[in-house]
Amino acid sequence: MYNRTQNDNGSFNTRCLDCFMTVASCVETTAELDRIEVHHICPEKALADLLAQEKAIEARSARN
Ligand SMILES: [Zn+2]
């Protein structure tokens, strides 16, 4: 999820809503925003995935 804002000069900024990092600023087109957002490697999401994996492993071992 990204929060896009537009500057007075018409360019765009985009911020990741998971880690609140500004992923890009002063981008000219929304197509460029799309491209940049796809390439954002989110530390918060990576951490959440890792925790989810750990929980799944714990749940499995608790059953045995
Ligand atoms: Zn992020």
Image: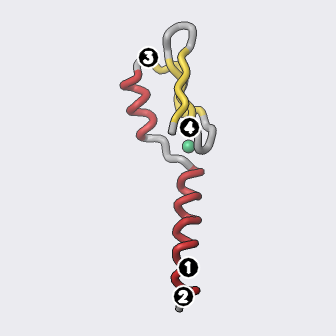
Residue farthest to the top? 9
**Where does residue 5 sit, x and y in percent of width and height?**
55, 21
Q: Amino acid at mark 4?
A: Cys
Image spot of residue 31 (x, y percent)? 36, 25
Tell me the CA gap for discs 3 and 2: 53 Å
User: Marks 4/3: CA distance?
Assistant: 18 Å
Tell me whether the residue at label 1 lies in contact with that at label 2, contact meaning CB atoms closer than 8 angstroms. yes
Q: Residue at x 61, y 37 (%)?
A: 21
The alpha-carbon separation of the residues under discs 1 and 2 comes to 7 Å
Name the residue: 53% across, 77% down.
57
**Of marks 2 and 4, which one's residue comes earlier in the chain?**
4
Q: Which mark sits nearer the N-terminus, 4 or 1?
A: 4
Return the residue nearer the eye: 50 or 61.
Answer: 61
Which residue is tagged 2?
Answer: 63
Q: Position of residue 35 (x, y in %)?
A: 38, 33
> Would the CB of label 4 be found within 8 Å of ligand 1?
yes
- Can you say whether 33 is above or below 47 in the image? above
Q: Residue 36, how many percent across, how many down?
A: 44, 33
**Residue 59, label in figure:** 1
Q: Nearer the viewer, mark 4 or mark 1?
A: 1
What residue sits right under mark 3 in the picture?
28
Q: Nearer the viewer, mark 3 or mark 1?
A: 1
Q: Earlier in the sequence, mark 4 or mark 3?
A: 4
Outermost residue on the front side: it is 63
Tag 3–tag 1 contact (CB < 8 Å)? no
Q: Decide if residue 32 is on the left or right side of residue 23.
A: left
The amino acid at mark 3 is: Glu
What residue occupies the far bottom of the structure in this picture? 64
Q: Are marks 2 and 4 in contact (CB under 8 Å)?
A: no
- Disc 3 crowd rating (10 Å Cα; few below 14, some 14-19, many 20+) is some
